[in-house]
Image (cartoon, rainbow, N blue to C red):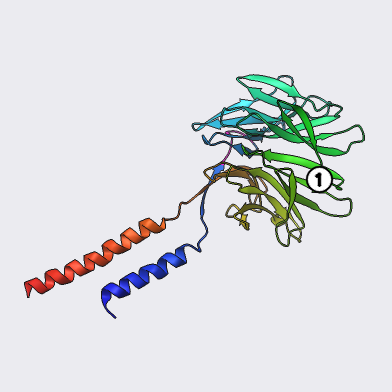
Amino acid sequence: MKPVLWGLMSLVLFLGATQECKADYIFTTLDVPGATSTGASGINDLGQIVGGYSNPDTTVHGFLLSSGGYTTLDVPDGRTTNPRGINASGQIVGYYQSGIIPLRAFLLSESIYTTLDAPGATSTQALGINDFGQIVGLYRDASFVSHGFLLSVAGYTTIDVPGEAVTGANAINNFRQIVGSYYSNSENFHGFLLSSGGYTTLDVPGALGTLPLGINDLGQIVGTYSNDGPGPSRIHGFLLSDGGYTTIDVPGSTLTRAYGINNSGQIVGEYMDAGFKSHGFLATPVPEPSAALLLSIGLIAVLGYGWRRVDSKEKV
């Protein structure tokens, strides 16, 4: 076979193989300086990250990581502050607790904290916000039953998976697609996607429980799932993209949870090391070479080989 033809065939085979590869990630540990534990829960398209950390005195604070610097977030008079989501405008949602008062949701916008209480709720948690300021979360009613909610300009809308005992809404994208979880009395947690008014169940194959926690505008979903077995090593993160589930585990971790994903595919969450200390993480996908780039490289190599042969013949 001629070298040029062999080179082109090899390139075609190589390109076909590369299309089957999944993206790898560069994992970066996130630790608030001086904290005993750290967890990251949300990321926007600017790469700003929110999460929570605890001090040696066990108090829980929120943080914003922006341009490499950490800023502490504390709701005034709050004993604990747990930020969960951030949008492109820098608006942050989460929940807090003051003394023995039940959990209450908050919105932080332009340095002002606003408490959010679902009507008739005994406790409220805001867990996600999109770029239009629409907020999702969960609340407990007077009977201590949990429901999901959507807060928009129209007010609060309850989200309940039909026929299920417990529902929580965890994240919302700019297309108003919502992910969350539900629980039946005799079963484990299942995930759901609410899109255009219809519910789709999400279950990692073989998992005992599935908790979707984040969704981006591409419809990529991240969360956590549990396997059968003892200890924390059975808790893993997952990415659902193009109909396929991929496990997300920080190398060397004994537990990984994925909480948020932005439109660049960057994932944030928390993991536990071998010493059972919790850290936040940022997983940045390593871009795969495009088919066009690989083809260009291959053609240059093939043409270069041909030019060398022509040049050698002219020198004979």
Q: Quadrant of residue 12?
A: bottom left
Label 1 crowd bin: few (<14), some (14–19), many (20+), radius 10 Å: many
**Viewer-proximal residue among 277 and 187:** 187
Above or below, comparing residue 99 to residue 299 in the picture: above
- Give the residue type that dot 1 points to: Val
Above or below, comparing residue 232 to residue 19 in the picture: above
Q: Position of residue 123 (x, y in %)?
A: 82, 30
Q: How many marks?
A: 1
Find the residue positioned furthest to the right.
Answer: 143
**Viewer-proximal residue among 26 and 219:** 219
- Point out the image quarter for the C terminus: bottom left
Left or right relative to 51: residue 103: right
* Magenta highlight range: 30-35
Q: Position of residue 147 (x, y in %)?
A: 82, 38
Q: SS at mark 1?
A: loop
Judge whether residue 286 is colored magenta: no
On the image, numbered disc 1 is attached to which residue?
161
Q: Position of residue 235 (x, y in %)?
A: 70, 53
Please give the name of the residue rendered at 45% of the width and 63% of the height, measured from the top-left corner.
Answer: 18
**Viewer-proximal residue among 125 and 305:** 305
